[in-house]
Image (tube, rainbow, N blue to C red):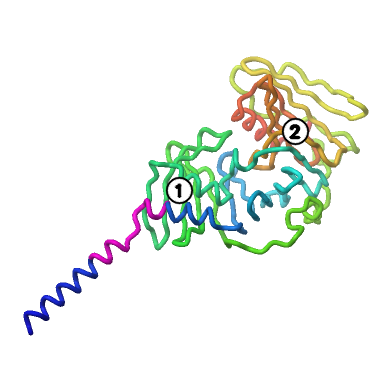
């Protein structure tokens, strides 16, 4: 009896040991479950805080994302520094960048976000994990921590990222780093819910244009005094690519609308057009939203390899057009932020 009992104990110990080994998920199992989760969900809602260290001063945003399969999106980005909300909206009519406090919208036909998904979208994070065959994974405080490649257009400095997911694959945190592993962009998720219910008009343009009660912000001249309607101070970017010089600043009156055109020539040739347009909606045949850190721009490209980046800042519309690479477009655009008009 005693000998039989010893064998029974050994058998039980062996069973528990083997059960523990077979019960532990491999990285391939985890990736398979993540892929399955991404395929099965009907949508999600999330709130998060996004911090960008890519400029001279950190920029913080409150980010709210609504997604409903197959292709409805609502992304509200509120700048903590400027207390201004912009919305990226995708519905059956197209893709919009809405600036409610200016009653202004850009509309364009685009594959966004499939062709340029930002960090705050769940599918962007999940796909970057699934698609990187060289991913690294570990467990930390009952969370999966992945280190994978980063591939975000417009910024070649961003090369690596770390992503934290709960055991049921909800994101809690993500960081994008440069080649020296310095964190330049981070996001902390405050709430994340799979398969929420949305109101019928949740992704309607008119409803979302009325979500902001902020008053319109007048454009300021040098010294902080509001300019008369239609006028504005000239804003000169503080960044110029190497091998490029400014060759002129020319005021233009086009169909009664006052504009200023800044011309640059050299290794790259481009123009920066500044105006205060009256149109409520501007439409483009193609393009995609581009996060500039302080606002959302619209990037388009024509057949002659000319790129155009358009953005709004305090009532002034900027259009940057030329043969600049995307990364240089972004650098020039970012250098207009915080510059007083002359």
* Observer-nearest of 340 and 131: 131
Query: Percent x, y for residue 335?
Result: 66, 33
Q: Is residue 272 above or below residue 75?
A: above
| Residue hosting label 1 | 162
Asked whether residue 270 is drawn in magenta, I would say no
The region drawn magenta spans 18-31
Q: What is the C-alpha distance between the residues marked 1 and 2?
A: 36 Å
Asked whether residue 26 is drawn in magenta, I would say yes
Quadrant of res 44 = bottom right
Type of secondary structure dominating the magenta stretch: helix
Which numbered disc covers residue 285? Answer: 2
Quadrant of res 246 = top right
- Identify which residue is drawn at 52% across, 48% down: 125
Q: Within 10 angstroms of label 1, few (less than 14), some, or many (20 or more) residues?
A: many
Q: Quadrant of the C terminus?
A: top right
Query: Percent x, y for residue 255?
Result: 92, 27
* Observer-nearest of 50 and 233: 50
- Identify which residue is drawn at 54% across, 38% down: 152
Which numbered disc covers residue 176? Answer: none
């Amino acid at each position: 009896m005693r000998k039989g009992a010893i064998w029974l104990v050994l058998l039980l110990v062996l069973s528990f040991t083997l059960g523990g080994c077979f019960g532990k998920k491999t990285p391939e199992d985890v990736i398979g479950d993540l892929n399955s989760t991404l395929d099965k969900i009907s949508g999600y809602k999330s709130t998060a805080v996004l911090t960008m260290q890519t400029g001279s001063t950190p920029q913080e945003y409150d980010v709210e994302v609504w997604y409903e399969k197959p292709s409805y999106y609502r992304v509200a980005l509120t700048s903590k520094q400027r207390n201004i909300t912009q919305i990226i909206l995708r519905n059956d009519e197209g893709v919009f960048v809405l600036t409610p406090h200016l009653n202004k919208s850009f509309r364009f036909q685009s594959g966004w976000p499939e062709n340029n998904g930002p960090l705050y979208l769940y599918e962007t994070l999940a796909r970057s994990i699934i698609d990187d065959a060289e991913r690294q994974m570990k467990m930390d405080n009952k969370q999966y921590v992945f280190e994978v490649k980063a591939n975000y257009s417009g910024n070649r400095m961003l090369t690596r990222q770390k992503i934290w997911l709960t055991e049921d694959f909800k994101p809690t945190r993500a960081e994008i780093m440069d080649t020296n592993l310095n964190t330049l962009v981070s996001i902390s998720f405050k709430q994340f819910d799979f398969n929420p219910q949305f109101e019928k008009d949740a992704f309607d343009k008119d409803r979302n244009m009325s979500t902001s009660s902020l008053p319109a912000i007048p454009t300021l001249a040098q010294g902080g005094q509001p300019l008369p309607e239609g006028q504005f101070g000239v804003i000169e970017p503080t960044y110029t690519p190497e091998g490029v010089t400014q060759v002129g600043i020319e005021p233009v009156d086009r169909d009664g609308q006052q504009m200023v055109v800044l011309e640059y020539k050299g290794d790259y040739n481009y123009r920066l057009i500044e105006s205060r347009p009256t149109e409520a909606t501007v439409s483009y045949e193609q393009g995609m939203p581009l996060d500039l850190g302080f606002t959302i721009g619209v990037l388009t490209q024509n057949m002659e390899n000319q790129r155009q980046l358009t953005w709004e800042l305090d009532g002034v519309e900027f259009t940057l057009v030329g043969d600049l690479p995307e990364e240089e477009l972004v650098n020039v655009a970012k250098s207009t932020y915080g510059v007083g008009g002359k």
